[in-house]
Amino acid sequence: MKHPFPDMPAAATTPASEISIAGDDEADESYLGQFIPLYYHHNMLMDENRMLSFKAAIDHAVFEGAKVLELGGGTGVLSCFAAAKASNVWCVEFNPDLVRESQRFLALNPHGHKVTVIHANAFEYLPPEPVDIVICEMIHAAMLKEKLVDVIEAFKQRYRQRFGEHLPVFMPEAMVMAVQPIQQNYDFFGYYAPIIQVQPAYFSHPETIELAAPMVYSTLDFSQPVAREIEWEGAFTLESDCVVNALRFITKNILSVVAEQAATIDWFMGYLALPLAEPVHVKAGDTLKVSFRYLTGGSIRSLENSIHASNVTICDGTG
Ligand SMILES: C[S@@+](CC[C@H](N)C(=O)[O-])C[C@H]1O[C@@H](n2cnc3c(N)ncnc32)[C@H](O)[C@@H]1O
């Protein structure tokens, strides 16, 4: 995997009302959208990459006696990590099954008694007093499907109205998203199926050929106003003759900034690999132009439908 992200043109923004979401957002919501099934929380608890990143970030950001709010608490695990040092944690969850389960789990853990689970909508809830840190893990690769951006922006607005201008620190503090052309093997025992996939980060992927270094297409800084609209156009120079048949979307969550070490605690999510509707044939040195636009929290289909990828190399007549 080629890291880090090289410099890129800044992402443009378009008013949300002008972006047509050519997807099936409503259908998307009904499974693994906002209502994540209970058994899937086990997968999240087992995800070492996710868990250790959050544990380290919470340990760094939450100070002794801090007041913490978690929006979308699920099983309560991140709230419980925070409770190791915090004096109070409010853990907001709207799925009644998870409200019940998190209360049961928290009672089994040291510090769990410092967490108050609240059955409420994260779009509406305000804590009874100002908080120092807001944790929100409503995050999906490429910031699709899950509603972190909307939830945080709505929260900032009502928090300011109630408690004044000074905002808490958000976890994640920021996020960086990049895109990379790839050639993906879609042959499954003789059956060709160009299918969407999520590839674990930090592992090698023998079925994937990386055709150029990833380019950053968006950075979100939650200490500033964040727009939902993402629109990007960029060009990759391909290093060898190949067929570009997919784009890989890389999402790095900057969970906490460790200023004293000039470092960050990051969580790389699984890479989202989306097959192109039409594979693009390129020769070494050709330029691949890529563009897409979508709304954070929108469906994967809406991003897929907006992707344009073409070989824009001008033929000089010699080859
Ligand atoms: C990706 S899970 C993360 C759960 C937990 N924080 C963790 O890290 O394991 C997101 C959680 O947010 C909850 N959620 C989604 N939308 C919500 C909303 N509008 N209000 C409250 N909770 C919400 C879901 O039910 C789910 O439990």
Image: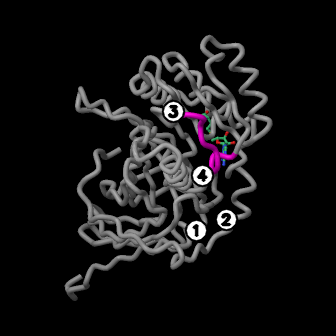
| Distance Cα–Cα, label 2 vs label 3 | 26 Å
Q: Is mark 3 within 8 Å of ligand 1?
A: yes
Q: Which residue is mark 4?
A: 146
Give whichever of discs 4 and 2 has the lower sequence position.
2
Q: Are marks 4 and 1 in contact (CB under 8 Å)?
A: no
Image mark for residue 221? none
Is any atom of residue 294 visible in this view? yes
* Label 4 SS: loop
Q: Which residue is mark 2?
A: 25
Residue drawn at (68%, 46%) of the image:
121
Q: Is mark 4 within 8 Å of ligand 1?
A: yes
Q: Which residue is mark 1?
A: 302
Q: Are marks 3 and 1 in contact (CB under 8 Å)?
A: no
Residue drawn at (25%, 85%) of the image:
315
> Is 309 drawn above or below residue 38 in the view shown?
below
Q: Are marks 2 and 1 in contact (CB under 8 Å)?
A: yes
Magenta stretch contains residue 307: no
> Is 293 drawn above or below residue 208 in the view shown?
below
* Other residues around mark 4 within 10 Å, as few (<14) / some (14–19) / many (≥20): many
- Left or right: residue 113 versus residue 312 is right
- In the image, the segment drawn in magenta is 121-130
Give whichever of discs 3 and 1 has the lower sequence position.
3
Quarter of the image that includes the N terminus: top left
Residue drawn at (28%, 72%) of the image:
287
Q: Which residue is mark 3?
A: 50
**Looking at numbered disc 1 in the image, what kind of residue is underneath it?**
Ser
Q: Residue furthest top?
A: 110
Q: Nearer the viewer, mark 4 or mark 1?
A: 4
| Distance Cα–Cα, label 3 vs label 1 | 26 Å
**Looking at numbered disc 2 in the image, what kind of residue is underneath it?**
Asp
